[in-house]
Amino acid sequence: MPEWWLEAALPSAVFGLMFLIWVLLPAPEGESDFASRLRKRIFKK
């Protein structure tokens, strides 16, 4: 049976990885969504 910290860390790691993939993958051309706005704010050029 997993330790309590593993039960907390594993979902957090999976959610964090999925969030990064969601923000880093480009949106379809012409589509504006929350991830696109976050991406523009994080990667200002």
Image (cartoon, rainbow, N blue to C red):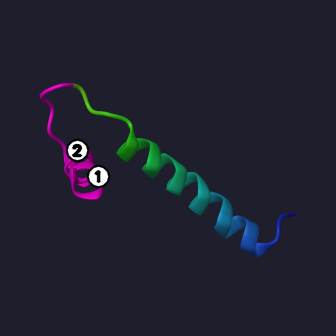
Front in this rendered view, residue 8 or 36: 36
In the rendered image of this protein, does residue 4 appear above or below residue 34?
below
Q: Residue at x 23, y 54 (%)?
A: 44
Mark 2 is surrounded, within 10 Å at the Cα level, by few (under 14), some (14 to 19) or many (20 or more) other residues, namely: some
Seen at 83% across and 65% down, the residue is: 2
**Which quadrant of the figure has residue 33?**
top left
Q: Residue at x 51, y 56 (%)?
A: 16
Label 2 amino acid?
Ser
Give how far across and how far down residue 38 sits, in percent: 25, 54
- Where, by quadrant of the figure, is residue 27 drawn? top left
Which of the two labelled residues, at mark 2 and mark 1, occupies the earlier sequence position? 2
- Residue 23, numbered label: none
Residue 30 located within the stretch drawn in magenta: yes
Looking at the image, which residue sits at the far top?
Answer: 29
Question: For residue 26, which quarter of the picture?
Answer: top left
Which residue does the numbered mark 1 point to in the structure image?
43
Q: Nearer the viewer, mark 2 or mark 1?
A: 1
Q: Position of residue 23 (x, y in %)?
A: 36, 46
Q: Is residue 7 left or right of residue 24?
A: right
How many numbered dots are placed on residues in this image? Answer: 2
Residue 6 lies, with reference to residue 35, above or below; the image says: below
Residue 36 is tagged as: 2
Which SS class for mark 2?
helix
Kind of residue indicated by mark 1 = Phe
Which residue is painted at 65% across and 69% down in the image?
Answer: 8
Give the left or right position of residue 24, taking residue 13 as reference. Answer: left
Q: Position of residue 9 (x, y in %)?
A: 66, 66
Q: Is residue 32 above or below residue 19?
A: above
Range covered by the magenta-colored residues: 29-45
Give how far across and how far down residue 35 sits, in percent.
27, 47
Disc 2 versus disc 1: distance between alpha carbons? 10 Å
Foreground residue among 4 and 34: 34
